[in-house]
Amino acid sequence: MSRHGMTVRPMGFCGGVGLALVATLAVLRLAPAGQPEEQGPQLLRAAGVSGGLIVHVGCGDGRLTAALRANSGCLVHGLDSDPLVVERARKHLRSLGVYQAVSVDRFDGKHLPYVDDLVNLVVVGPSSSVPKEEMLRVLSPGGVAIHLKSVDPLEIAERWSKPRPAEIDEWTHFLHDASNNAVAADAVVGPPRGLQWVGGPPWARSHDHLASLSAAVSAGGRLFSIVDEGPIAAVVLEPKWYLVARDAFSGVELWRRPIAVWQWHLRGFRSGPSDLARRLVATESRVFVTLGSDAPVSALDAATGQTLLEYPGTDHALEIVHHQGMLLVVAGDRATEEAKGPHPGQRPGFVRVRSQRPPYAEDPPVKRLLAFDAAAGRMLWKKADAETAELMPTTLAAKGDRVFFQNADAIVCLDARQGTPVWRAARPVARNRPAWSAPTLVVYEDVVLSADRAVGPPPEAKTLGAALPSGWFVTSGGGQAPVGELIAFSATDGKRLWSAPCRECYNAPVDVLVADGLVWTGDLVSARDPGITAGRDPRTGEIRRSRPADQHFFEPGMGHHRCYRNKATSRWLVLGRSGVEFIDVATGNALPHHWVRGGCQYGVIPCNGLLYVPPHSCACFITAKLNGYVCLSPKPAGPPEALAPHKPAAAARASTELPQAQAGDRLERGPAYGSTEPSQPDARDWPTYRHDAARSGRASCEVAAELKPAWRTKLGGRLTPPVVAQGMVLVAQIDEHTVHALDAASGKPLWSFTAGGRVDSPPTVWQGRALFGSADGWVYCLRLSDGALAWRWRAAPLDRRIVAYGQLESAWPVPGNVLVHQGVAYFAAGRSSYLDGGIRLCRLEAATGRLLSETVIDHRDPQTGVQRNDTIQGTNMPGALPDVLSCDGSSVYLRHVRFDLEGREQPPEVPHLFSPAGFLDDTWWHRTYWLVGRMMGTNYGGWPVVGSRVPAGRLLVLDGPVVYGFGRNQYSHTGSHVGIDAETIFHFNLLRYNPRVTYYQAFAMLHDATAEPKLGPAAKPKAKPAGKAGAKTAIKPASKAKLTPEAQPSGSQADGAPAKSKAKAGKAGESKAQPAKAKAKPDAEGPPPKPCRWTRQLPVLARGMILAGQHLLLAGPPDIFRAEDPVAAVEGRSSGLLLVLSPTDGKTLAEHALESPP
C-alpha cells in the first residue's frame, strides 16, 4: 500500500497481529518524497512513539536523523560504521544548531552501543545488518523497531515491537495503587547492579527544609515527578516547582508543566504534610494532578502534558485515587497556610535553618470526598459530612466495588458507585499528633488493615513539653515512635479479625506491606531495632514466617531509619535503614546498599523492573553514595567476563598487564599517530585543568592588575575552563562534544574536534599533543598543531551507553581532563565502585596510547558480589566515585582515594586538594566543599567538622603552605545557608540559640595538617560474623517474641547520626551488630578558629579563582539580591565581576566589570 510516496510492506507477521499493524499504518497521512523534515514525524506516528530515545542506524547525511527529533521530548542518536559519513552528518546537525539533542557516532555495524531496555524507537536504514535480536535487546518494553526499505521515497519493510513483560509492574499512586498496599507485583526488580539512567537535579536543595521531590509515580512506561528545581546554592531563594514527565526506561524528559504555588519550601524538613505525595496519580494515558497547592485536580495527556479537563469542585484538593475508571478526590475548604508563605511564627528578616521552635499548630481543613467519572469529568457523587470532615491523611483506598477511609473515630466503607454507607467499624486514632504522621490503611483481598500509634498523649510531649500545641502540629523532631496497634477488619462487613503490635517508622507512618501473601510490619526506628522480621497471615494474624534481625546480615550504620516509608515488591521488602536494603521475603536474606538512598520524605519506587531513586541532600556515606535522580537496574551494563578482566582482590583489583591482543582491541590509531613532534613547555603556559597536576590554580607567570579585553570569540553553549599552551587556547563545548583550538594572540579559530560524548573539562596539552577524555568512554590524543587524531583508546570495557542528564553517555565515562605525569596518562572510567563492575583507573603511555595497567576499583565482595558488611564504620564506608585526577608527584588521587604511580591503592595518609562532590560539581550544594585534607567527614555532624578545621571553600588555590580560598565563614551541622543577600541569612546553633550571620569570604591561611580530625577510612576487611550479606539463610519458624513499649528508643536522634550502640539482644542464633567504629562529633561547641592570615567579604560569588604572581584574581556573578530576578546571579544570567586582590592582605587592587560571569 502506498500513501504520498511512502510504502508499507508488512513482513514477518502472521494472523491478526500482522493485520492489526497494517491497518494502523494504512491510515497515515504522508508527505511527498524528498522531504526528510516531514519523514521524521511520520516515522514516529507509524511507530506510535511520541518521545524518548530514538536511534537511527545508518544515519547517512544526518537529514533524517535530525527530522526524527519531532518534538522536544525526543533524544536522537545516529549511528554509522563509516567515519566519513559520521563527520558529514555531524556537520549537518551543527548547521541546524541541534547537536545537543541530536548526535551521531560510530559503531561496529552489528552491536548497538546501549544497555538493555533503553531505546524507545530504532529506525534501521536499508543497508543495515544489525541482527533483530540485538534490536530487541536494546528496545525498552513497548519499544518499536522499524526497518526501512528505502529513504527516498520513504518505504517501510518491517515493523515490530517489544512486548511489555508480564513480570514487571507499574506504580500509579504514592502507595502503589488504590489499595494503598505499597507492593509492586514485579518479579524483575532486584538488588541494583547497574545504572540505567541518571538525571537532575544532582542534589536536593536542602536537608533542613521541605524535600525537593514531593511526589513520583509511573505508568505507561513513563515516570512523573513533582520536583523543586530552584537554586541548589541558595535554598532561601524562591523555588521552581515543576511536574516533569520522563521516559521510565531511558530517563529522557518528555515534557514539563510549571507549578506556580506549592507547599512552602522552607517548611521544616521531615515535618510533613503526610498527604503531599498523594496529589499525583497516573494511568497509561492520563496524569491526574493538582498544579498548585490550592488548585483543582486536572487531567493531563500523559504523552504531551496538555490539560484535557479539570474536575469541578476539587479546589484545595489534598489526595487523589484512581480506581476502575473512577477518580476519588479528598478536598478541603481552604488552602494550607504554609503554601502562602512563612508561618506567623517565622520571624521576618531571617531564616531558621531547622524546624520552627516551638512547634506550631497546623489545623487541617474540613474535608469532603468526591467521586468522578475519570474520563468524562462528570461528578458521580459527593460526601461532605461528619464522616469525611476528619478524614485522616493517606487512608483513602478502593478495592473492587468498595471505597474505604479512616476518620478520627472509625473506618468507613462506602459503595464505590453510589457513595452510600456499607459499614462502619470503630477505630479511634490520635488527634494530637505531628503533621508528618498518619494512620496506615491497606486493603488486601477481603481484609482491611489499619495501623497507627496508640491513642493518648503524643510521645513528642516528652521532649517538647508545654510547647506542644493541641491537635496537629508541625515539627521536625523524630524518633519518638511508640508501640501502636495493627488491626485487621473484614472488608465485607467490618468485623474485627485480629490485632498485633506495630510501630511507626522514623518520621513516617507505620509500614504495612502485604508481600507474597503475608503482612509485614516491623520495628526499625533506630539502628538497634531488629527490622521487619515476621510475616503474618492476613486473615488470622498468625506469624507464618520469621527471619533473623537485620543486624544478622549487615551493620545499619545510620543511627535511625531514613525519614520515609518503606516499599516492597512481590519478592523483596525494599527498606531505607541506611541506604536501600533488599529483604528476600522467601528466604529472609538481607542485601544492604548503603551507597544509594531514597529522597527525604518520599523514598524510592521499585517498578518497571527497575529502582527509581530521587535526589537527596544527605552527607552520610558521602564518599561512596550516588547522587542525582537515579534509575538502577538489577543487572550490570555488560556480561561478567567483560566487566571483570582481572582476578578480584579484597578492596581493589590489582594492577595487571593485559594481554597485548586485548589491549590492542581498545586502541585505535589515527592519521597523526607517530607524527607528533614534541615541544618544549613554556613557563607561562596553563597546560591543564587548574594549571598543574596538583590542581593548584597557581600560575607560573605574572598577570597585571589593570586588564582590558584583547579579543572575543563566540562559541556558545556551556564551556569548560580554558587551557593555554604553545600559543593556543583550548576549550571544550561541553554539550556539543567539541574541543576548539583558538590562536592565543587573536582568538582566531584554528581547528575543532568532535568526540562521541560530552567533554566536561579541558584537555591537557603535553609535548605537542592534546589529551582528553569523553563521556563516550574513550580517551583521545590529538596532534596539537592541527587537531588530527593521533590515537584514541576505549577506557570503557565495552561500548554500552545510558542516558545521563539528557544525553547519551557511556556507562563508564571519562572526565575530560587527563592527568599526564612523567609521560604517563592517568584517568578513571566509570560511575561508582559498586555499579557496572566498578571504576577503572587506567595508565597509558601518553605518546602512543599503549596500555600500561588497568586497576578495577570494585568494592563489592569478590566472592558474593554484594556490599561488604565488615568495612562499614558508622556512616562511612569504602567507595569511589568519578572525578578529574590529581597528583602530588608521588601519589595519584581520585577524590579521597589514593594510589601510587603504578596504580595500586594506598592508605589515605597524605593531605591533598580534593572535593567529595568532585572538582567539576558547580552546584554549591551546602554539605560539600573543596578541602585540603585526607578524608571528608560524613553524616549530619561530620560534614562540617573537616571544613571547620582545614582549608575549605568553594574554590582553593595552593601556594606552598599557603592556601587561598573562597568559602563560608563557618560550617555547622544545623545548616549553612549562604547566598544572595547574605547579610539577611542567619545560622542557628542548636545549643546556644545565638543567631550568627553567615556569608562567603575570601581568605588566606596556612595549612596545618595536625588540625584535621582523625576520621580515617573505612576499616580493612575483618573476619565475617556468622550471618553475612548474601548468605543463604533459611527463614525461621514463627517467633513468640513480642513488641513491647520497652522496645522503643528513649529519645530522638539527630538526623543522619551514626549508630550509637550495639543492636538489641536478638533471638537465638542471631549475631549482634557491631558498634560504630568512627563517629564524627557535631560542632556543637563551635570549631577552633582557622589560622587565617586575612579574610575579606567581597561583592562577588567567586566561580573562578587563580593566583598569578602578586595578584589573586576572583571572578563570578555579583553577590547582590535583585528583586526583579532573584536567581539571576546563581544561575549565571547576570553580569560578572573580576576582582584583583593582594595575596598579602586581601585588599582589592582592581575591579573589572564582565558581560557575563565565568
Image (spheres, rainbow, N blue to C red):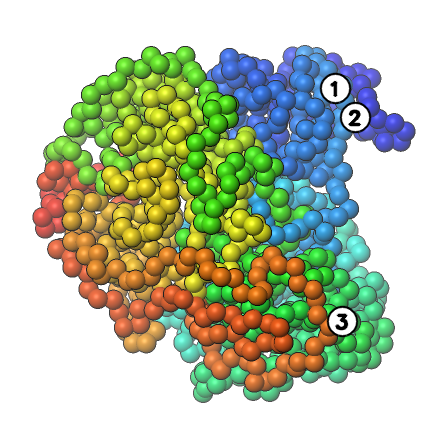
Q: In this rendering, is residue 112 above or below 884?
A: above
Q: Which residue is mark 2?
A: 25
Q: Which residue is mark 1?
A: 156
Q: In this rendering, is residue 842 above or below 150?
A: below
Q: Which residue is mark 3?
A: 544
| Residue 331: quarter of image | bottom right
In this picture, residue 527 sits left or right of residue 1101: right
Whole-percent x, y for residue 947 in the image: 28, 58
Callout 1: few (<14), some (14-19), or many (20+) C-alpha neighbours within 10 Å? many
Q: Nearer the N terminus, badge 1 or badge 3?
A: 1
Q: Which quadrant, please, contains the N terminus?
A: top right
Q: In this rendering, is residue 44 above or below 155?
A: below
- How far separated are the C-alphas under marks 1 and 2? 10 Å
Whole-percent x, y for residue 224 in the image: 61, 49
Tell which tag, 1 or 2, sits nearer the viewer.
1
Residue 49 appears in the figure: no
At horizontal 63% and vertical 81% (from top left) the residue drawn is 1043
- How far separated are the C-alphas under marks 1 and 3? 57 Å
Q: Which quadrant, please, contains the C terminus?
A: top left
Tell which tag, 3 or 2, sits nearer the viewer.
3
Q: Secondary structure at mark 2?
A: helix
